[in-house]
Amino acid sequence: MNCMLIMVIIAEQEQIAQSKQKGELLTWDDLAKMKYSWRVAQETLRMVSPIFGGFRKAVKDIEYDGYLIPKGWQIFWVTNMTHMDSSIFPESSKFDPARFNNQASIPPYCFIPFGGGPRICPGYEFARIETLITIHHLVTQFTWKLLADNFFKRDPMPVPTEGLPIQIMPKTNITS
Ligand code: HEM
């Protein structure tokens, strides 16, 4: 994630923080204003989906892309196969939160970090809230520095190769 991107997130979150009294809690309206932060989170979920994929069972014979999938077979859908398909997400290896500017432009069942259909993750909204609240408090109250090379391996889930050691500093201590 580049510096420019972090600066935009900080500006968005600082603006919300400045509109609140000390200790005042975030509201639904505040979350709705965190548009850029959520696009960055979505782009992160697209490129580094925490869930590798999942099983589905064919309830009838299906023909897909010239292949017959017989009734009763198990299918394993893989998140990254869809997320890194450049016919769906152009320049799919590029980190570009702007691809989520127009959510309606993303075809159905193509952004699937939370799965899809009747068994879609029921924690989707809760995960969104947790993510945005964490970003808000992290960037408005702290600065941090990575203490290791920021590589990850797939095992098959994405795992930072050296853990994720960071030095975290409260913003108030820096300015005082
Ligand atoms: C970033 C966070 C999360 C991600 C990426 C995620 C992803 C997923 C995925 C991919 C599935 C399978 C969906 C499918 O088969 O179509 C799933 C299922 C599920 N998730 Fe999440 N999840 C997240 C957070 C949560 C949270 C916060 C909760 C609960 C508070 C939750 C509860 C569940 C449950 C209960 C299922 C099983 C649903 C079913 O089989 O009917 N998840 N999640």
Image (tube, helix red, strand yellow):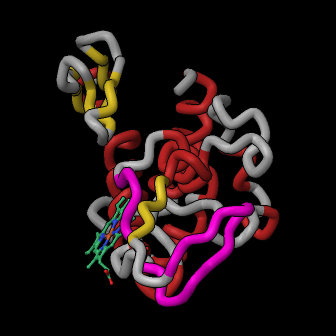
Q: Which quadrant would the C terminus be assigned to in this image?
A: top left
Q: Position of residue 108 (x, y in %)?
A: 70, 72
Q: Position of residue 79 (x, y in %)?
A: 49, 53
Q: Position of residue 174 (x, y in %)?
A: 28, 21
* Magenta range: 51-70
Q: Nearer the viewer, residue 115 or 43?
A: 115
Q: Nearer the viewer, residue 5 or 115?
A: 115
Image quadrant of residue 84?
Answer: top right
Q: Position of residue 109 (x, y in %)?
A: 63, 69
Asked if the magenta segment contains residue 50, the reply would be no
Q: Going 52% across and 27% down the picture, which residue do you hit?
A: 1
Image quadrant of residue 85?
Answer: top right
Above or below, 114 relative to 99: below
Q: Number of marks in the image?
A: 0
Using residue 133 as the reference point, say whether residue 32 is left or right of it: right
The reply to whether residue 13 is visible in this rendering is: no
Using residue 80 as the reference point, say whether residue 35 is left or right of it: right
Q: Going 36% across and 54% down the picture, which residue do you hit?
A: 51
Asked if the magenta segment contains residue 67, the reply would be yes
Q: Nearer the viewer, residue 170 or 146?
A: 146
Quarter of the image where ligand 1 sits: bottom left
Image quadrant of residue 76?
Answer: bottom left
The reply to whether residue 4 is visible in this rendering is: yes
Using residue 50 as the reference point, say whether residue 77 is left or right of it: right
Q: Nearer the viewer, residue 158 or 145?
A: 158
Using residue 154 as the reference point, say whether residue 113 is left or right of it: right
Q: Going 64% across and 30% down the picture, which residue do you hit?
A: 93
Above or below, 171 relative to 46: above
Q: Going 75% across and 40% down the picture, which residue do you hit?
A: 86
